[in-house]
Image: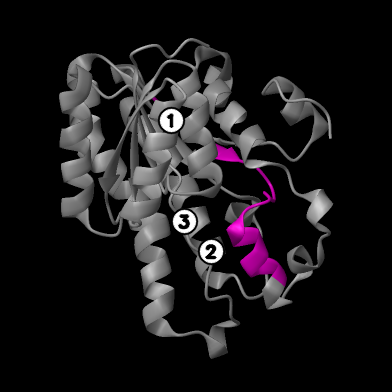
């Protein structure tokens, strides 16, 4: 799909899925707004995209702070007068710990990023999208939204809550031209997966590295989710874990 001159916001854009998605959309002609807490890494990514002929800019943003997210939304709106696509990718899983061993402050911060960060994105970007006649939100989800995984109470709980947010936002705003969809990629070869592997807790940590899909596959699937071909799955989490799901999203078989 051609995203020429579309404004695309990506949170958690400094590395992993976020960085791959930024490069994919920039190559498709989008003006990508890269948001992350790591200004140096995000600025370096923006420069790489520009060197490759794309259009990108970096914005320092902690999605756990509404003021940061609201400023990001205003900036994105100022680029071309509208925000076409908002990808809520920022997420944390560290520290992994069983509930009785968990740190309440760390657990709360994960909830602030994984859940409130997605809500803040919706709240900040929705008014402008509605005024412009429409727009799309893609929430990077997980099979953890519907699973109980040892050591992941913060991650499972927040991803389940984000799935509910996806459903509610779709119910409230689909008739105003707003598309909201979750994308559940399965396990991905990123730094987060290295943290999971190092924990040694639950079966996911035991998976061989070859079992994980690439961030580039997720980026391609996000582009699919951003276009009308995915409309049958609005208000839901679409999974890439099955051969059928990968085929629907235009990905090659594993």
The picture places residue 80, in percent across and down from the top left corner, at 21, 18
**Toward which corner of the image does residue 146 lie, by quadrant?**
bottom right
Q: Residue 182: say if magenta.
A: yes
35 relative to 253 in the view: left or right: left
Q: Residue at x 51, y 55 (%)?
A: 159
Question: Going from the N terminus, do you reach mark 2 or mark 1 first?
Answer: 1
Residue at figure coordinates x 55%, y 83% from the top left: 99
Q: Position of residue 89 (x, y in %)?
A: 46, 45
Q: Residues within 10 Å of mark 2 (few under 14, many from 20)?
A: many
**Residue 82 x, y percent position in the rendering:** 22, 20
Residue 204 lies, with reference to residue 24, above or below; the image says: below
Task: Decide which of tag 3 and tag 1 comes sooner along the chain.
Answer: 1
Coloring applied to the structure: one colour
Instruction: Return the residue at label 1.
Output: 49
Inter-mark Cα distance, 3 to 2: 9 Å
Residue 57 in the figure: left or right of residue 254: left
Indicate the quadrant containing the C terminus: top left, top right, bottom left or bottom right.
top right
Numbered disc 3: secondary structure? loop
Quick check: is 72 in the magenta stretch? no
The residue beneath circle 2 is 155
Disc with the residue nearer the chain's start (3 vs 2): 3
Q: Nearer the viewer, mark 3 or mark 2?
A: 3
Range shown magenta:
179-197
| Residue annotated with mark 3 | 91
């Amino acid at each position: 799909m051609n995203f020429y001159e579309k404004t695309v916001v990506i949170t958690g854009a400094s590395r992993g899925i976020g960085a791959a998605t930024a490069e994919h959309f920039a190559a498709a002609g989008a003006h990508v707004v890269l948001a992350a807490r790591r200004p140096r890494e995000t600025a370096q990514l923006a420069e790489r995209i520009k060197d490759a002929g794309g259009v990108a800019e970096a914005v320092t943003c902690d999605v756990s702070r509404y003021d940061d997210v609201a400023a990001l939304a205003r900036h994105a709106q100022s680029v071309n007068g509208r925000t076409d696509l908002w990808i809520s990718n920022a997420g944390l899983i560290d520290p992994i710990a069983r509930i009785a061993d968990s740190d309440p402050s760390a657990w709360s911060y994960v909830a602030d990023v994984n859940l409130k960060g997605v809500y803040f994105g919706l709240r900040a970007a929705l008014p402008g999208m509605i005024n412009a006649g429409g727009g799309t939100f893609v929430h990077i989800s997980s099979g953890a939204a519907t699973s109980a995984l040892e050591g992941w109470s913060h991650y499972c709980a927040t991803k389940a809550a984000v799935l509910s947010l996806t459903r509610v936002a779709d119910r409230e705003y689909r008739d105003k031209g707003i598309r909201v969809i979750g994308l559940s990629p399965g396990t991905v070869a990123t730094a987060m997966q290295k943290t999971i592997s190092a924990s040694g807790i639950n079966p996911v940590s035991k998976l061989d590295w070859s079992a994980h899909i690439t961030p580039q596959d997720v980026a391609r699937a996000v582009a699919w989710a951003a276009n009308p071909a995915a409309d049958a799955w609005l208000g839901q989490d679409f999974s890439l874990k099955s051969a059928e799901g990968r085929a629907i999203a235009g990905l090659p078989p594993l």
